[in-house]
Image: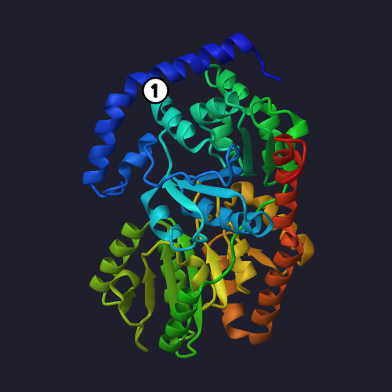
């Protein structure tokens, strides 16, 4: 129930007015970003809702295909939507699927992983004109938003056109929750959430936060989707890396945030005193951080290879720094141990451990996991060995010593992680599709698509 219809409408009116006033500045901003390489050099007008692809003609006079618009902000959310897109197309090949992402990095990776029949555009800005252009041209029947993409013009404009809006893998961080709970923001978020047809939440904590922001409990369900397939291209990369690693002992620190590399490199320095041929794969959250780390390590005469420069892993290489995007899932295939970053410093909130578990890694994480604590709890409930949450760098070191020195312990953790993931995710894509199909799609004409 909307807390106050008048307050909500006033808040939305102010937001739209500010958006219209900012549109000239947004043009200048995107042109500046394009010059800096932050926007696509030729397709950046798509950000203003100007299409670069033709809309398919209807199959028969008077008819048109059902158009599903999937939207994600960045790479992780975009990859998570792919299995649902594939599931949709298998069951309804007559549907037209439109995919958008916001960031250029996501666009460059995901464009090669989507089914060829999917139309892929850069997401429009949430300005009144851009959204009007986009919705008028593509005329979607339903919008499926990933994770936390709550944009007022998108949601409210779509709903006012009779377009069903769904939020999948829905999450609301504590920081975002506090921001939306403010006196000025609460009427706006209340209005947005009232327009959603379905919220598929990651866990109970997230669901409660959405309800406290006035989402109707009747539209909230639970499930999460993700893409774990490995392409032929990735399979070749895996084989190549395995040849270079030559059966050496390996561990990986994944999605490492700035400052966390000190913890990981300290642990590695201690470990190679015991395991002298040990190789560490260091995957930074942001590519520029990886390049800086590699440069510093070389100054310290550490044998380091850098992924973006296609540097070979030699027998003497101690640290392999991965400063590329979209390769994490592939890298989990080549390492038996994965330490998930974003969890070793206060203020961080962890990352999804499911991909590493699905690939059969022994999974470790730090103490700061935020809303992923529910996922860790579910996995540990299935098998206590599935995820090791360490208190800090000392416990991290001791756990890595155990896994690297005890083949049976390592194998038990790997099997436990894969088993827990399998139990947790069994049939999840089908469940999400059924929710979307039953609650949203059948409302168009009374018959489920």
The residue at the far top in this view is 6
Estimate the x, y position of residue 206 in percent, counting from the top left: 67, 40
Residue 374 placement, left or right of 111:
right
Reading the image, the residue beneath label 1 is 19
- Compared with 345, 315 (above or below) is below
Q: Badge 1: how crowded within 10 Å, few (<14), some, or many (20+)?
A: some
Residue at 51%, 46% (x, y): give it: 72
User: Which quadrant of the structure image shows residue 233?
Assistant: bottom left
Q: How is the rendered protein coloured?
A: rainbow
Q: 247 or 1: which is nearer to us?
A: 1
Q: 114 or 66: which is nearer to us?
A: 66
Residue at 44%, 89% (x, y): give it: 243
- Compared with 282, 289 (above or below) is above
Label 1 secondary element: helix
User: Which quadrant of the structure image shows residue 339?
Assistant: bottom right
Q: 447 or 267: which is nearer to us?
A: 447
Q: 404 or 246: which is nearer to us?
A: 246
Estimate the x, y position of residue 433 in percent, counting from the top left: 70, 50
Residue at 32%, 25% (x, y): give it: 23
């Amino acid at each position: 129930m909307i807390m106050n219809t008048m307050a909500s409408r006033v808040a939305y009116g102010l937001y739209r007015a500010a958006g219209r006033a900012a549109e000239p500045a947004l043009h200048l901003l995107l042109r500046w970003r394009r010059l800096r390489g932050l926007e696509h050099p030729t397709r950046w007008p798509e950000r203003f809702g100007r299409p670069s692809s033709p809309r398919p003609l209807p199959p028969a006079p008077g008819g048109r295909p059902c158009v599903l618009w999937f939207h994600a902000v960045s790479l992780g959310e975009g990859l998570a939507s792919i299995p649902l897109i594939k599931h949709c197309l298998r069951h309804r090949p007559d549907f037209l699927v439109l995919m958008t992402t916001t960031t250029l990095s996501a666009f460059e990776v995901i464009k090669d992983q989507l089914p060829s029949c999917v139309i892929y555009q850069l997401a429009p800005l949430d300005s009144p004109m851009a959204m009007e252009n986009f919705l008028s041209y593509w005329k979607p029947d339903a919008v499926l938003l990933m994770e936390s993409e709550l944009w007022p013009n998108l949601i409210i404009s779509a709903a006012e056109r009779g377009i069903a809006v769904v939020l999948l893998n829905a999450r609301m961080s504590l920081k975002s929750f506090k921001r939306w709970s403010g006196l000025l923001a609460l009427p706006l978020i209340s209005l947005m959430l009232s327009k959603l047809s379905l919220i598929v939440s990651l866990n109970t904590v997230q669901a409660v936060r959405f309800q406290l922001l006035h989402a109707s409990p009747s539209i909230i369900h639970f499930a999460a989707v993700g893409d774990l397939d490995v392409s032929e291209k990735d399979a070749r990369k895996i084989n190549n890396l395995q040849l270079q690693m030559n059966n050496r002992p390996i561990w990986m620190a994944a999605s490492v945030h700035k400052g966390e590399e000190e913890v990981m490199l300290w642990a590695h320095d201690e470990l190679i005193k015991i395991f002298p041929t040990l190789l560490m794969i260091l995957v930074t959250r942001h590519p520029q951080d990886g390049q800086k780390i590699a440069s510093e390590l070389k100054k310290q005469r550490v044998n380091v290879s850098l992924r973006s420069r296609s540097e070979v892993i030699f027998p003497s290489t101690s640290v392999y720094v991965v400063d590329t995007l979209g390769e994490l899932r592939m890298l989990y295939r080549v390492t038996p141990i994965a330490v998930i970053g974003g969890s070793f410093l206060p203020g961080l909130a962890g990352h999804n451990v499911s991909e590493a578990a699905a690939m059969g890694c022994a999974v470790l994480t730090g103490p700061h996991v935020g809303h992923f604590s529910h996922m860790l709890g579910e996995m540990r409930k299935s098998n206590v060995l599935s995820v090791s949450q360490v208190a800090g760098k000392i416990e991290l070191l001791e756990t890595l010593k155990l896994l690297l020195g005890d083949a049976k312990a390592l194998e038990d953790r790997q099997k436990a992680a894969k088993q827990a993931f399998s139990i947790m995710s069994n049939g999840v894509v089908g469940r999400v599709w059924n929710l979307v199909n039953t609650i949203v799609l059948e409302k168009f004409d009374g018959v489920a698509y």
